[in-house]
Amino acid sequence: MNVLWRTLLVVFRARRGRRRGGALPPTGVGRVRLTTLPTDLDLLGHMNNGRYLSLFDLGRWDLLIRTGLAGAMRTHGWYAVVAAETITFRKSLTLWQRFDVESRFIGHDDRALYLEHRAVVDGEVYARAIIRARMLKRSGGTLSHEELFAAVGRPDDLPDIAPWMHDWAAASALPPTKAPAPSLWP
């Protein structure tokens, strides 16, 4: 439940920040300041590994709102779904520790947008996640990049994704939703 309240607070702050400070550039870094709460901890007394991804969602909300993409999504009936994600941990976050979730778009391929999220304490990266997100239409189907960039503009400085991300996306992919995907163990 605390992530729900945190989400509402992040959405409110992002909207206020966009009104007061203007839009964040599409390739800008969004930052959300958080504190590790007792409900974030596992039995070992540090942040639960699954909680990082839930809190990185907050960074995504902030980024979508502050770049203006959330408004375009609402107007056109689009939404984003996470297709794949990978996270790497360096150091543990502990109870009451303040940290920033830093988020930014890092590129796209022919089917998805890629984002990076970091948990940062005093300028030091504690954890990093790479997210592959697909844009879908509420009316059905996948949103093409041409449609997306026609509505929001294509950032001139959006880099190509690193080659390893293509390999990761292919290696982590499951069959399409209309294809069979039986759960068979070797």
Image (cartoon, rainbow, N blue to C red):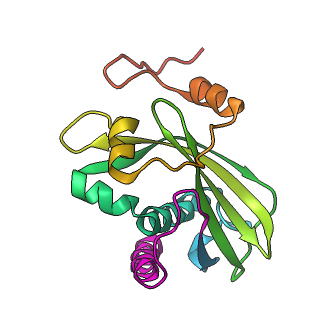
Q: Is residue 5 above or below residue 133?
A: below
On whether residue 45 falls in the magenta region, the answer is no
Please tell me whether residue 57 is drawn above or below residue 122 in the rendered image: above
| 35 to the left or right of 126 | left
Query: Which residue is most to the front?
Result: 156
Residue 118: where, in percent of width, then height? 68, 60
Quadrant position of the N terminus in the picture: bottom left
Task: Specify whether 58 is left or right of 15.
Answer: right
The residue located at (79%, 71%) in the rendering is 123
- Tell me, yes or no, whether the highlighted magenta stretch contains residue 9: yes
Residue 20 as seen in the image, left or right of residue 137 = right
Q: Main SS type for the magenta part?
A: helix
Please report the residue visible at 35 percent of the width from the left and 17 percent of the height from the top: 179
Q: Pick the residue in front: 99 or 54.
A: 99
Compared to 5, does 152 lie above or below? above
Residue at position x 32%, y 40% from top? 147
Quarter that holds the C terminus = top right
Q: Is residue 34 above or below residue 176?
A: below
Relative image position of residue 11 (x, y in whole percent): 40, 74
Provide the residue span drawn in magenta. Answer: 1-30
- Quadrant of res 137: top left
User: Residue at coordinates 76% horizontally, 73% vertically from top-left?
Assistant: 121
